[in-house]
Image: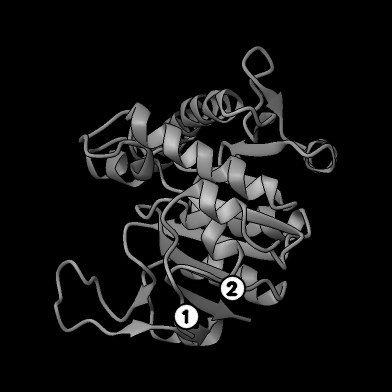
Amino acid sequence: MTHTAQTSAGATAASSPSPWRRVVVKLSGEALMGPGSHGLDMPTLTHIAADLAASAALGVEVAVVVGGGNFFRGIAGADKGIERARADSIGMLATVMNALALEYAIEKEGQSARALSAVPMPSLCEPFSRQAALHHLGKGRIVVLAGGTGNPFFTTDTGAALRGAELSCDLIMKATQVDGVYSADPKRDPNATRYEALSQDEAIAKNLAVMDTAAFALARENRIPIIVFSIREPGAISAALQGKGRFSLVSP
């Protein structure tokens, strides 16, 4: 499987329609901080929002599960002595901050969006329900999903797989800092092997760290393929939706 990278979200949106009907994109909080060490980088937020808008312009219903690691990571908080369940709750609040920022950035691109939180915060955004999310998707809005699963001890990767199954998505898109799945961290191991395609059983058996085992298992049980790609490439989301760019396909 060889792919040609796109140069811009606009160029991608003008290309052929996507074969996917409804997708969930998993964005890490770290993806939103750009070159910084924490928080939000507005140019980065803007180009991701433009790419999501271009993806919706392809006729695809787009849900986005966003992490919170640019503000707070529950596992890191637990390592520093905060009770794990409490640390994960703080991390869920961090994802809501990112979801509100991303919702605003998407709407600045002229694309309607709604932030929904698994942790009810009705004064800030709509509480998540399957019915509400499907309603907004059906109206052509990008749905930004915050709060993870709403429970401690589950990662936002698992949250993305759960929402993918719950919303009957055709595809899970895992945005990372590298261009696919590798046998080891390519930033640390120059001999790491890149996989063009593999099965979710293989990913679990090889303990590949690009997503946690629970996320892979949920996707496998619900027969949802996963593509893993680099969010650093301009127009990466809309390109991957059309089978272009560089990515790894992890199949059920």
**Res 154 seen here:** no
Report x, y in % for residue 92.
Answer: 49, 34
- Quarter-of-image position of residue 205: bottom left
Q: Residue at x 69, y 75 (%)?
A: 221
The amino acid type of the residue labelled 1 equals: Ile
Q: Is residue 223 left or right of residue 25?
A: right
Amino acid type, callout 2: Ala
Residue nearest the observer in this picture, 203 or 234: 234
The residue at the far top in this view is 123
Q: Is residue 119 left or right of residue 95?
A: right
Q: Quadrant of the C terminus?
A: bottom right
Q: Is residue 235 visible?
A: yes
Q: Position of residue 245 (x, y in %)?
A: 45, 68
Q: Residue at x 69, y 17 (%)?
A: 122
N-terminal of the two: label 2 or label 1?
1
Percent across and percent down for residue 30 are 33, 43
Above-or-below relation of 79 to 182: above
Please tell me whether residue 212 is drawn above or below residue 150 in the rendered image: below
| Placement of 27 over or under 101, stated as above or below | below
Q: Read off the residue under disc 2.
A: 217
Secondary structure, mark 1, is helix
Determine contact: label 2, label 1, CB under 8 Å. Answer: yes
Compared with 205, 219 (above or below) is above
